[in-house]
Image (cartoon, rainbow, N blue to C red):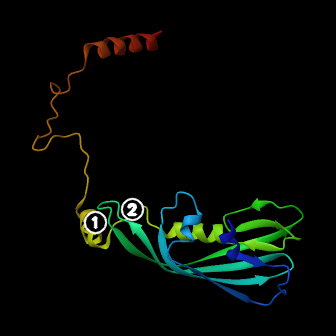
Amino acid sequence: MNKLRAFDIEIVHIKEHVPHTYNFKLDESSFFTLFEDSIIQKGLLDVIVDLEKTPLHIKMNISIKGNVELICDRSLDPFEYSIDSAYPLIFQFSEEEEGEITDEIIGIKRETIKINIAQYVYEFINLEVPIKKLHPRFQEEEVDNDEETLLIYSTDTEGEEKNDSPTEDLIDPRWLALKSLKDKSKLN
């Protein structure tokens, strides 16, 4: 966990209403190995954190740009996947450490000295990974298949003509008996 300390941002000495920028470089594999069961094993990413402190909160904008190595779900071949995204994050000062208030707002004590953003960066990177991880050589096939696939559900069998004759609509005799009981009960 000592390697995660590289993602600490000391907020106690930051002046209010003065923009600050922090740069982090995620190298080949050391960052992702710090997290158990990571779907990403390798990546080369630049993380830029723009931060501004006010008396009520700390606003961060975390920009992530670079490539990660994913494993194709179809062929199990590794491939490079490009990531270019930005996420807002707000640390709101309060008397007690509240944790996550919403997806973008985290409650922290006013006495907090530093914030470690490693877990947030890791989660933001994972949000960019597609559910279906396909090697680029399969991407065109997948788009073509999606356009061609059109499911039509019907109870009619193909080539059968509809016939509205009463003999076609035979009712099970048990249902007729129940219907007659229902009709009798209406008369009473």
Residue 86 x, y percent position in the rendering: 58, 79
Q: Is residue 161 left or right of residue 96?
A: left
Query: Relative to 102, does residue 28 appear above or below in the rendering?
Result: below
Query: Relative to 23, does residue 144 appear above or below in the rendering?
Result: above
Query: What is the CA distance from the residue labelled 2 to the residue labelled 1?
Result: 11 Å
Q: Pointers 2 and 1 in contact (CB under 8 A)?
A: yes
- Which label sits on residue 142? 1
At 17% across and 26% down in the image, what residue appears? 166
Residue 50 x, y percent position in the rendering: 68, 85
Q: Is residue 11 left or right of residue 69?
A: right
Query: Relative to 179, does residue 141 appear above or below in the rendering?
Result: below
Front-most of residues 90 and 43 = 43
Task: Give the secondary structure at mark 2.
Answer: loop
Q: Is residue 61 left or right of residue 141?
A: right
Amino acid type, residue under disc 1 in the picture: Glu
Front-most of residues 114 and 95 = 114
- Which label sits on residue 132? 2
Find residue 11 and report its image quarter.
Answer: bottom right
At 84% across and 87% down in the image, what residue appears? 15
Amino acid type, residue under disc 2 in the picture: Lys
Front-most of residues 19 and 121 = 121
At 80% across and 70% down in the image, what residue appears? 92
At 29% across and 62% down in the image, what residue appears? 75
- Which label sits on residue 24? none
